[in-house]
Amino acid sequence: MYVARNLPHLLTNEEVDRVGAEWHVYEMADIPEDWIKTSTNSLNNVVEYIPIDKYWYHVFSTPTTIETPQYVTLTKLVKCLLSLSHGNSDVERSFSQNNHLVSDERSSLNEASINGLRATNAGVKFFGGGKVHMVPATAALLSNVQEAHSRYIKDNEEQQKLIKNIDVVNGKRGSDAEHERLGEKEIELLNEQKNLQQELMNATKMLEERSTRLATALSNKTLDDVGTAEVLVTAANAKLAELRIMKT
């Protein structure tokens, strides 16, 4: 009963309890041998079994004592399980159909569009034998087409709104990034100005010190100190001129 309880959206709680009871009845049932196998080749020891769908057909055809169906909920469960794929052929066939529908010119189709094409193709095969002009144009079909068109327009409108919202968010992010970049540039310029101001103060201080040294050297008539002071004063003046140009 694990499968009955865990197969999603198939059985209700009441049906799970009923299928448990029906399964116990099935376990105690006397199954004829010819429901299981057709014949046995004694020479090669080969057993030919009945196909599983035919076997369950015999089981589900078993009536109760009052001629009502014996296995109601069990029939529902087994048919759903048998409809599941037991091999890769269905999957490979589905991939082949997708490759046929999605050509190089239609490679941008999304999953919803592919599902719609597959559903339309299956509908044409089921109702018209694969021929579009054989599909009966009933009132229900026309109503479904109109409803599908309305949903298509609504989905397009919602998609456009979503794109606009994304553009607005991206634009806001872009403006925030630009504002952040300008802020970083402003901080960089302030730091550069601060460094220039410090160098200017150092050059001014050096000029004052060298001017004092030059005045002392002249008063003491020390020619070596006078020459050195003149070189330092010249260098200080050149540095001040350079810093003033950079600051402006």
Image (cartoon, rainbow, N blue to C red):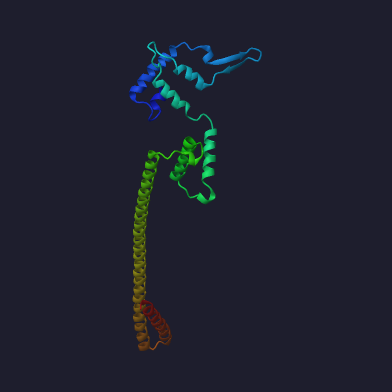
Quarter of the figure with residue 232: bottom left
Q: Residue at x 36, y 46 (%)?
A: 151
Which of the pair 58/212 is nearer the observer? 58
**Quadrant of residue 89 within the rendered picture:** top right
Expressed as whole percent of the image width and height from the top left, the position of residue 141 reads 40, 40
Residue that appears at 50% across and 18% down: 55
Quarter the N terminus occupies: top left
Residue 51 seen in this snapshot: yes
Q: Is residue 166 shown left or right of residue 114?
A: left
Quarter occupied by the C terminus: bottom left
* Numbered label tally: 0
Q: Nearer the viewer, residue 93 or 202?
A: 93
Residue at 51 percent across and 42 percent down: it is 98
Q: Position of residue 53 (x, y in %)?
A: 50, 22
Query: Where's residue 227, x and y in %?
Result: 43, 86
Q: Position of residue 19 (x, y in %)?
A: 38, 20
